Amino acid sequence: MAAARKQSTADVCHSILSELQAGKVAPVYLLMGAESYYIDKVSEWIQNNLLNEDEKDFNLSIVYGSDNTTNAQQIADNARRYPIMAERQVLIVRDAQGLKNLEPLEKYMEKPVPTTVLVICYMNGTIDSRKKIVTRAAQVGRLMVSDPLRYDREIISFVNEYISQPEYNATIDARSAELLAAHIGSDLKRLSSELDKLLLSFAPGAPRKITQDLIEQKIGISKQYNVFEMRDALINKDALKAHRIAKYYCSNPKAGGLFALLPLTFSFFQNLMLCYYTPKPVNENAIMAQLGLKSTWGTKDYITAMNNFPARKTIQIISKLREIDARSKGLDNASTQPDELLKELVSFILH
């Protein structure tokens, strides 16, 4: 029997928000992890929607675990009090990772007060899953572990999901979504902010399609000099184009340059190495299956690269990418600047 697919943080977040919107409110929410976007999304919804404005004065409390005057015992005591002229009280604990002792909250969760909504926001990490506070939170309320996105495909999925929300109802082409993922990365707060900037630029009633032209105009990511154009130049061994883009990066440090190119290029050549193990006949559908892709979009790049880079050269490129990455972080490199490392990498791949 196949194992059940682990729910993503986005799925858990949407599930919690759907329950809240339907009026199903839990007494405890333990929200923890390195990705603050989803933690903030749930806690801010609770803060803004569970009480009306008149009720908030007496029944909404926000405390900070990083405040030396706050401790878990005080929070537990406040959670046990009853609401004043309202159905419930809301107690939000931000920066809960700053609390030195969580045992009083563990004890509170043995018998949480049904008229209190206790929201614990534990940022920049997680509590050991074997701790009682975690198991009890899952038993009596809702537990969400907000992990950072690790792969480009996850970031692209976030982009598509974000802009397709009913209030936005926008679309984006695949290349533009990849461009945003590569340049902005997995910082979902920044990514959502940049997406908001793009979405707000549309005139009322106008079709909402995010393109590379719009991204260049509103965010400043060049459609001509970006990591995907560089990757295409390398794949096709277009030395003139590759060196022209490298020169642009050297003249425009804010464009990302080496640090934007490394993860994208490493991911491509790592996948390219897998392509050499594709069962014959090697075609777009076979590569799609080998790499676990959802469509054949982009598989032509791998076929082109297989013609231009033998397996041995591919292994050497992967090794070189690891070396350049280490040197860019100062390992075994006292003086070589990122611009020089970029030129060295481009020359190595092309020749």
Image (tube, rainbow, N blue to C red):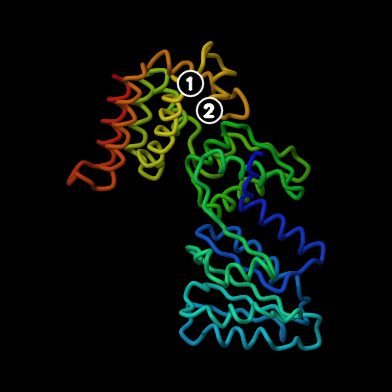
Q: How far across and down, in percent of the image, does residue 185 sit?
A: 49, 46
Circle 1 or circle 2, nearest the eye: 2
Task: Residue at 62%, 88% (x, y): give it.
Answer: 77
Quadrant housing the C terminus: top left
- Residue at the extreme top: 281
Quickly name the residue at label 2.
291
Quadrant housing the N terminus: top right
Residue 197 versus residue 163: which sits nearer the camera? Answer: 163
| Residue 171, label in figure | none
Give the quadrant of residue 104: bottom right
Residue 228 versus residue 38: which sits nearer the camera? Answer: 38
Badge 1 local density, few (<14 within 10 Å), some, or many (20+)? many
Badge 2 local density, few (<14 within 10 Å), some, or many (20+)? some
How many marks the image carries: the answer is: 2
Task: Residue at 53%, 11% (x, y): give it.
Answer: 281
Task: Residue at 32%, 20% (x, y): give it.
Answer: 312
Residue 53 versus residue 68: which sits nearer the camera? Answer: 68
Badge 1 vs badge 2, beta-carbon distance below 8 Å: yes
Quickly name the residue at label 1.
302
> What amino acid is found at the position of numbered circle 1 in the picture?
Tyr
325 above or below 110?
Answer: above
Q: Earlier in the sequence, mark 1 or mark 2?
A: 2
